[in-house]
Structure formats: structure tokens, C-alpha cells
Amino acid sequence: MYKLLIRPILFLFDPEKVHYFTFFVIKILHKIPFFPAIIRKIYLVTDKKLERTLFGITFKNPVGLAAGFDKNAALYTELSNFGFGFIEIGTVTPKGQIGNPKKRLFRLQEDKGIINRMGFNNEGVSSIIANLKKNKGKVLIGGNLGKNTDTLPENYTKDYCEVFKALHPFVDYFVLNVSCPNVGSHAKLNDKDYLITLIYAVQSLNKKETYQKPILLKIAPDLNDNQLDEIIELVAETKIDGIIASNTSTARGNLKTSKDRLLEIGNGGVSGQPINSQSTKVIKYLADNSNKSFPIIGVGGIHSPQDALDKIKAGADLVQVYTGFIYEGPRLVKQINKEILKQS
């Protein structure tokens, strides 16, 4: 019903407006008695064979929702009812910010993709913590960390550390988002020496806590083999807990969408099917060339159970969806988990 009826209607309207409208509808429907239980009955797959234990955390199933969908931790409880094993919120910055000027979110329907240049729009860490306090451990939450757009390069680390320290009691794992192409002035964030400095700074804060929490690094799908070798070296040197591969891509070479339309859209990161094979290649390279020495969360262009299985076969321990959830609908999560069960 979603692809035949609901999606065609939603796709008639501006993507960002549809996003907030969908949030509103899901929130309202979940206030109806028994509705949450019905949704869980339809979409949730519960089986011990789906459980995955990674960096000390047991995930009920290996399919998560990627960062960027629930930026402000406003809907994680409701979204978890659609069968996700974990929800990654953010990207979270110290101060709230409106992000880049609109329009900044565009569908590539021929490609089953999206281009976005949102620019880390979020309400800021204090507001997000207020939302997370309602969780009380019910939903497994990842916190995706970033810097404010107007932060000077010498203060990047301070931004990440501020959000890390504030969020520490309220999330289960952390992600250092250093690969988003939509925030400007991020060249420093791709420098290996700076990344080591950043990781050590956050790890130092982590060691001061009673309970240490896993810290992962999110990388771009556009890295070449030499850069991926540097990532493997970085993981070995810093002992960071894992890698998320991958973020959105700046590449436009394999798109069916016309060049005129792409020029009209302008800058932004591509997600969805166009980056599927490249993100899988990145996962495989990291896994093969590190002798699978660290956990990998695979994300990028998962629109079917087979896409998820390909990433797991390539070396991903968990997977995340975002654009596929928009194009294929909520049944995608259940379909992936069912197929994983068949393979177990």
C-alpha cells in the first residue's frame, strides 16, 4: 500500500515539508490507544537469532535507522515500533542552528536517491537531552556528533567534546561525524592527524566516566584506497571502537537524473541507491585489509534485503537505512530481518 498509494501522494510535495508532516502524523497516530501495539505486531521481528553483541552492547536486531532522520530525538520511541534494532539521532551540535538555506532536500526519483545539503540543522544539545530523558533505556540510541557551522577550526574539538560530555548519560554509543559534505569548512575534519587528536580528546573524556561508551567514526564513501588505508591505521593507533561506512557522497557520475536537473539542484550529498555499490566496496576494503579487526556499521543505498545482506557479506556487523526507508516504506526493516533469519 505504501508504494502504490502513500508514496505517490507524499512525493507530490516538498521533501522537507513531507518529512515534518510524516513526523506529525506518526506522533498523532501513536497517541491512539493500542496503535503502537498494532504497529509492533505488524513490523517487529523478535528472535534471539537476530541479536548482535558489538562493543559491549546487545542489539535486538542488526537493522538501525541512520542519523539525519530523527535529528532532534523527537520520534525515536515511535520509530522503534517499526522494527528497528537501534536509532541514531542527530547530528547534534552544541548550539541549535537552522542549517543551510532552503530548498536543501531533493528527490532523485529516477535514481531512488536523495540529495541533501541540510547543514546540521538541529535544536542543539540541551533541547535534545530533554527529549532523550524520556527514553529511560527503552530504545537503544546512538548519538551522532558534529560541530556548529560558525565554529572556528581551532574550536572544532571543543564542540565535539561539549556535545559528547552532555550526551554521555543519555545515549548508548557515539559517532564522530567528520564526513558530511554539507557543513562547509570540513577539510580539517578529513585530516588524519587532526582526527587522531579529536579521537584522543573524546576518548579522554570517556575514560573519566564511570561507564565508558563506544565511539565510532563515520567516513565518506568517496575515499580512495590510500585514504582507507589511513583509516585502518587510525583505528589501530587510536583503538576507536568502530567505523560507520558510509556518509553521503559528492559524486554525481553514475546518476540517471539529467545534468540540467543536477545543476539546478546544486551542491549536496547523495544518498540512496546511487551510493549502494560504493559504500559496499568501502566496507569490503576496510574488512579485508584490516583482517576484520574492528566492527563496521554499513549504511548507504540499502533498498532491499539483498542490499543489506551484501553489506553484511562484505564485512558489516550491523546495517542502517534512511533513504531506503523513504522509498521502500516501513516494511523494509521487517523484510531485511526476515531474510537475515533465513540465512542464519
Image (spheres, helix red, strand yellow):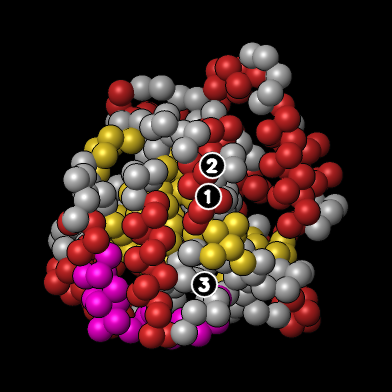
The segment highlighted magenta reads 183-202
Q: Amino acid at mark 3?
A: Asn
Vertical relation: 102 (above or below) 323: below
Element type at mark 1: helix
Residue at image location 48% in from the left, 47% down from the top: 129
Residue at image location 66% in from the left, 48% down from the top: 327
Residue 63: which disc? none
* Residue linked to disc 3: 148
Residue 227 located left or right of residue 334: left
Q: Are marks 1 and 2 in contact (CB under 8 Å)?
A: yes
Locate the C terminus and report the quarter of the image it occupies.
Answer: top left
Q: Amino acid at mark 2?
A: Asn
Element type at mark 3: loop
Element type at mark 2: helix
Vertical relation: 185 (above or below) 307: below
Distance (Cα) linking label 3 and label 1: 15 Å
Task: Specify the quadrant of the image occupied by residue 119.
Answer: bottom right
Residue 73 picture location, percent across and down: 54, 45
Q: Which sits earlier in the primary sequence, circle 3 or circle 1?
A: 1
Residue 261 located left or right of residue 176: right
Q: Nearer the viewer, residue 2 or 69?
A: 69
* Residue linked to disc 1: 128
Magenta stretch, main secondary structure class:
helix
